[in-house]
Amino acid sequence: MTVGPTGGSQAARKGPCVVIAGGGTAGHIEPALALADAVMRLRPDARVVALGTERGLEKTIVPARGYPLEMIPPVPLPRKPTVDLLKLPLKVRAAVKATREVLDRVGADVVVGFGGYVALPAYLAARGRVPIVVHDSNAKVGLANKVGARFAARVAVAVPDSGLPGAEVIGIPLRESIINLDRAALRAQAREFFGLDPDAPTLLVFGGSQGARSINTAVSGAARALADAGIGVLHAHGPKNTLAVQEVPGAPAYVSVPYLERMDLAYAAADAALCRCGAMTVAEVSAVGLPAVYIPLPIGNGEQALNARPVVDGGGALLVSDEELTPRKVADLVVPMLTDPARLATMSAAAQGSGHREAADVLARMVLDTVDKSRS
């Protein structure tokens, strides 16, 4: 089933057909869509088709960005031995069959996978039929990309030492709106949009789309110390959480919101960020030049700390474990940083220098080169 725009003028194009497989989470979808935009910039005659499932965020995000979305059966990979593990071969077989039908119908010239449960059937369906390019955003590569990399024409990763043989380090593809964000030019508009003090040093706080309770507790607990230092706060606490912070008369505003629809304005309003360090978050915060205090998610296999390590080592950020994050720790780290303009400028330059702002175009050229070689 196809969801959203079927391409309109895309249908008449005779250029290469690029199939992107990056469904499930925003960490997979956003790099895939950044690549799609870059492909269309470089080859306006190209067609881009996305693969997805009914359960992923791609169901709404991809059509909203103007790309056709082909649905395939999901193949979630169980982390523990369960009954679902016994059903996995049948689920994979069904998903691969459905994906092959899509690849044949759209005339795929290349499949580009970004990991997750959409990528695995895409790799298996394309193997031996359509060239494959793999991109992994994380410091620790997931199972799907480990499989896909074995028979990919090109493999790209965000950071060194990914563990994938022959991988090319290119960074994470980002939206043009982030890469080209002029924070200084948007600062006044952004501060007004959120109701922030127009001149006070401002901290942006967020913990992912659902928020992070430990971050919420620690930063709101430091509200008085931040206010006394003349620091304003823009805090996205998550739609399922609430945040009550007592206002300090005469101090810059502490603005709390459930969710940030306009991340571009949030980045422009801020002088520094305190947040988790998922791969996409680190890439975006670094690209816009925001100094950061990164708090790795305390569960998982430690990949969030690894995501942040290059920026921290380069001087663009600080790293604090979740268990260490207390109101006192927030004040001790944030107040000296945000009240020292020279330090902020140095960290901002270091953050931007640690990124790969051209990653989307680099990956797009890799993909189009792969198509050209397969046709020659």
Image (cartoon, rainbow, N blue to C red):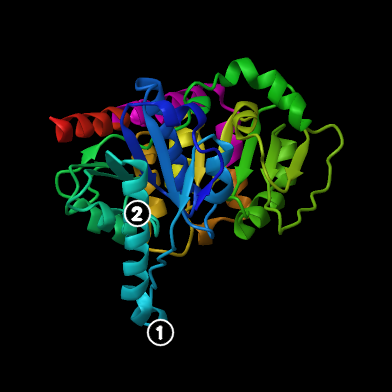
- Residue 268 position by quadrant: top right
User: Residue at the spot x=61%, y=37% of the render?
Assistant: 335
- Give the quadrant of residue 339: top right
Q: Residue at x 83, y 48 (%)?
A: 246
Q: Position of residue 39 (x, y in %)?
A: 37, 28
The mark that comes first in sequence, 2 or 1, is 1
Q: Is residue 55 left or right of residue 351?
A: right
Residue 288 shown left or right of residue 261 in the figure: left
Amino acid type at circle 2 is Glu
**Label 2 vs label 1, nearer the camera:** 2
Q: Is residue 337 visible?
A: yes
Q: Is residue 356 visible?
A: no
The residue lying furthest to the right in this view is 249
Residue 298, compared with residue 103, is above or below; it is below
Residue that numbered label 2 is attached to: 101
Residue at 69%, 38% in the rendered image? 234
Vertical order, 265 against 222 (above or below): above
Name the outermost residue toward the top. Answer: 185
Q: Is residue 360 magenta?
A: yes
In space, the residues marked 2 and 1 are separated at their CA atoms by: 28 Å
Q: Is residue 178 above or below residue 318?
A: above
Q: Which residue is mark 1?
A: 83
Dot 1: element: helix
Q: Amino acid at mark 1?
A: Val
Q: Position of residue 124 (x, y in %)?
A: 26, 58
Residue 80 pos. (x, y %): 38, 78
Q: Position of residue 216 (x, y in %)?
A: 66, 54
